[in-house]
Amino acid sequence: MSDLLQEGLNLMLMGMGTVFVFLTVLVIGTTLMSKLVGLTTSQSDIDSKARSQSTAAREDLTELAAVAAAVKVIHER
Amino acid sequence: MEQLMLLLSQSGAANLSFGQLTMIIAGLVLIYLAISKRFEPLLLLPIGFGAILVNIPGAGMNAAPVYDAAGVMLSGGGLLYYISALGLDTGIFPLLIFLGVGAMTDFGPMLANPKTLFLGAAAQFGIFGTIIGAVWMSSMGWMDFSLTDAAAIGIIGGADGPTSIFIASQLAPHLLGAIAVAAYSYMALVPMIQPPIMKALTTKKERAITMTQLRVVSKREKIIFPLVVLALVALFLPSAAPLLGMFCLGNLMKESGVVDRLSDTAQNALMNIVTIFLGLAVGSKLSAEYFLNIETLGILVLGLVAFCIGTAFGVLMAKVMNLMSKTPINPLIGSAGVSAVPMAARVSNKVGLEANNQNFLLMHAMGPNVAGVIGSAVAAGVLLSFLG
């Protein structure tokens, strides 16, 4: 086997090895990161977000009601 | 009369060499493929036009500036010379394209199922298998490729245009034109190259496998992910930092949601500008002396082989993972590991639908697809650190 072919095979083994090792580390890192984020974004976090959204929605409604009432009053005049 | 003769003797027709004529015709073929067949028109059209411009005799579009002994500029040099010296020889253009690609990539499907990163790794066999093919061709005495040439050719198998151009510009600038043309042509041909291989390696029952619904990925995960990638690159593979660094920056700009203007510019205006320049610069490398030789033919053959090996190994890896995994994995998504976003994922989806018309694999295939981009950038980093 020629030297060049030998070097090519070396490059392939080292290269694929590095690619797999790196991506394995990335898989582990990503999985850990997702778990950590899942822990810190606890249920209360999501709840509070949902609550703030619902309060916002309620405010919108009261605003709408106020406008509607005002329009009604003006029209009745 | 004398002046008329002078004008005639300086005309393009009088000075056109056979090689230049051939390259102009090659440029016209690329433009035809771009317009009529819609082969990656965004790049092949400017590449084809650049190839024509650079081969016009006497136009000096690719001429370097000339200085006299005192350092006074005698002639300014051509436009294409400056464009390719600025962006291609330095590797800046492909990196800016990577910024835009990062800003367009959604890692959601991959984060929902991180195992698909392995499919993106397996498909990189195409790169290294082709390197073996290239050095084998030289050891048989058919071609004259050094190991760095072989590496630059192999990266075509990453099915990632900017990565191929980046590596070629760093490792084998004299092959850049042929490598870029091969990479973009075969990416356009993915819907024809992949399905026969995918069908040959799977049974109908395997192709009909339905995968479980992906979980919802939180915004916070998507923001942290590019930082995780960057940290790992910095720790383990700094040679991949230019490519993946720009990629992660683009992705962070998109996912953070606070710099929509920048993210919008990176994926539209900036990307379009750079694409025009990159196309012209690659076209300017298509000069007769570099392109019209047996090596180009070898590169075209090896590029096709690279795509086929990458596809095959992606599918085989998915089959192995399906045997070991608790949740079913359809082997068809493995072929999407060869980047070529989003074409390869669409091919997986299409072949899957042929086997089971209720089976939508697109989102599942996007995981390995974007993993393939990371995989080929990592492979590029390995090649750079070994050979650069």
Image (cartoon, coloured by chain):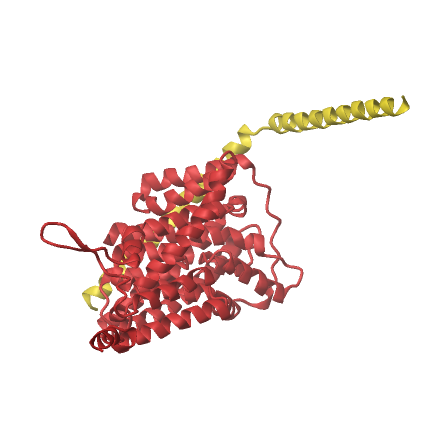
Q: Is residue B143 left or right of residue B376?
A: left
Of all residues, the one furthest to the right in this rendering is: A76
Which residue is at a point 26% across and 77% down the rendered structure image? B14
User: Residue placed farthest to the front in the image?
Assistant: B1
Quadrant of the snapshot with the N terminus of chain B: bottom left
Tell me what residue is drawn at x 43 percent, y 50 percent. B271
Query: How many labels, in total?
Result: 0
Looking at the image, residue B328 sits to the left or right of residue A4; the answer is right
Compare residues B25 and B147 and report the one nearer the observer. Answer: B25
Residue B47 lies in quadrant: bottom left
Task: Name the residue at the left extreme.
Answer: B69
Q: Position of residue B261 (x, y in %)?
A: 49, 38
Q: Is residue B14 above or below residue B95?
A: below
Could one spot residue B70 in this view of the protein?
yes
The red chain is B
Q: Position of residue B274 (x, y in %)?
A: 39, 51
Q: Is residue A29 left or right of residue B167?
A: right
Residue B184 position, x and y percent, is 41, 63
Chain shown in yellow: A
Q: Is residue B340 above or below residue B191?
A: above
Instruction: Work out whether residue B44 or residue B133 is closer to the camera in this orientation and state it.
Output: B44
Question: Residue B335, image x and y in percent?
Answer: 48, 61
For the question of whether residue B129 can be seen, the reply is no
